[in-house]
Image (tube, rainbow, N blue to C red):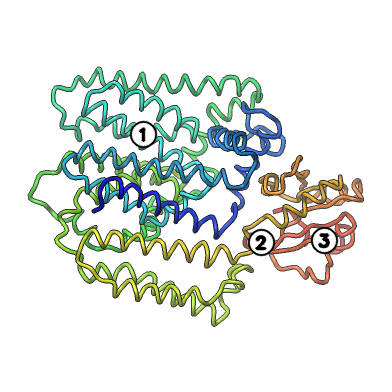
Amino acid sequence: MLNKNHFNFFIVAIAALLLGIAVAGRHYIPPDETRYLSVAWDMWLRHDLLVPHLNHLPYSHKPPLLFWLINLGWYIFGVNDWWPRIIPFLFSLGSIFLVKKIAEKFWAKNNYVGNTASILLLASTIWTVYSSALMFDMMLTFFTCLGVFGLVISLKEKKSQGFLYLVIAFAGGLLAKGPAILLQLLPLALLAPWWCDQKNMEWKLWYRSFVISFLISVAILLCWAIPAGISGGAQYQHDIFWGQTANRMVNSFAHNRPQWWYLAMAPILIFPWFFVPSFWKLLFQRSSRKMTEGLRFSIAWFLPVFIAFSFISGKQVHYLLPIYPALALMIASEFDRIKKIAWYDHAAIVLPLLIVGVIFYYLNVTHRMHDMAPWMRSLPIENSFILILGALILFFWKTNEKLEFLWKLIVVNLLITSILFLGVIYHTGNAYDLREVSRTLKNIEDKHLPLAYLGNYAGQFDFIGRLNNPPKVLITSELFNWAKEHPEGRVIITFDGEPDFEKMKLEYSSWYRGSYIAIFSSNDVNRICKPQPKLCIEH
């Protein structure tokens, strides 16, 4: 293993390389990333940092920290596309170094544990994807790691500084993604008497300090929430103080999935770790030695949160990001029990690459891929060859050295990340890159022509096109009246099927996500939609 300074340099360099691949391969992807950008853009245009807005309405789905950070970067560097990409990357990198600091407190004589956990996170494809995604989960992960570090400091070193970290973690987590931070930290705190070996602990005093830390952070949150609630109105007050949290936790209105869903998704969630049999063998194999404090700590961090999220109705891959470090520490803490890397470990990590490469080739040559989504027609068949060739090279790069094998996992992740971003998303063209359609909409706005969107508009084009006003949102029954009242207007319409755009002769048409999008003039609405009323409907 490299010395500390060299190792830290390589961690930053590899993380930056993975970020560079993501940035080169994609722009901001709708609807989530473009929505959050548009909320921040609205905040910038309004010069209003108190209440986030989307489509001229208060946006209560997320707290404001991400939008504040985006605006802070724009204030310093000017409005740009690159700064928002850096935000999740910085939080991801901060989380990795916090994991190293946490490991040092439990394995002071073995810096391999922290280094191994860091490498495992960099080798995780899901971690890499969300390290470049403009979402809230990497922020929550960072504040979770900071809070965990505060817990450890306060317990193992009995320093009041740990509670300061807790206050920052709770406040940052609440402002990043609401009460989810409490779910991340509370189980670990409640289980502290089980995993902490510290003797002569005054647990009542410690728990009192823990509660006080949380209450101080709530007070910090209220410094924003109370003025924002007053300014945003009664509905906004209800949503930020209760509605969104209750709905998401009890009966999620989106992403409702069965309790076993995370287990079924494990091969993707923890790729490529999942395909290393020796990792699982050491975790489930009985050991004659007593369970270490660090292993108990890692289990107490990971397992209760995983069980809780399995029972919560709304499930998404990125919801589990804050406990990835715990799983990495669990594996890293037992890593020295692996005697050597076996041949089947090498075979297991390349087998998924071979299978995906062969399936991709088969779907491409049989043209069956074209039926899945329109943009798949543009995917180069070379992706399959790269996957197959990469898998074979990785298989023949054999080593029995455990640490060298960890670096091999990073190379596996680099290959998958490159294929995902440069081989797939990059070739989707306008399906997930909205710059071309957004420039067209900006030109329409600059001509002072009325602009509308048929269906549920999520702010996809506001920031990308630097629009000063979002399009007017229409439902199907309003379309023809709006076109009549605005004869020079333009309407954005999305389609499930593949209309004959060549015959329609529209101002703009293209792929859009898994379907198509077009810009209709009011004359086009009367010329095309009236004879075919089922063609132009809201989505």
Q: Which residue is mark 3?
A: 507
Counting residues from the N terminus, which is met first, the one under dot 1 or under dot 2? 1
Q: Name the residue at 70% across, 31% down.
A: 46
Q: Name the residue at 47% across, 30% down.
A: 174
Task: Give x and y (percent) for residue 113.
Answer: 23, 47
- Quadrant where the C terminus lies? bottom right
On the rendered structure, is 392 left or right of 372?
A: left
Q: Which residue is mark 2?
A: 430
On the rendered structure, is 219 left or right of 523?
A: left
- Name the residue type under label 1: Leu
Choose between 313 and 357: the one closer to the eye: 357
Task: Determine the image quadrant of residue 210.
Answer: top left
- Determine the secondary structure under disc 3: loop
Q: Name the residue at 76% across, 40% down.
A: 468
Q: Pointer 1 and pointer 2: residues touching (CB < 8 Å)?
A: no
Question: Of tags 1 and 3, which is closer to the observer?
Answer: 1
Disc on res. 146: 1
Q: CA distance from mark 1 to mark 2?
A: 39 Å
- Name the residue type under label 3: Glu
Q: CA distance from mark 1 to mark 3?
A: 51 Å
Count neighbours of disc 1 (C-alpha within 10 A) and say few if under 14, some if 14 to 19, many if 20 or more. many
Q: Is residue 76 above or below residue 202?
A: below
- Name the residue type under label 2: Asn
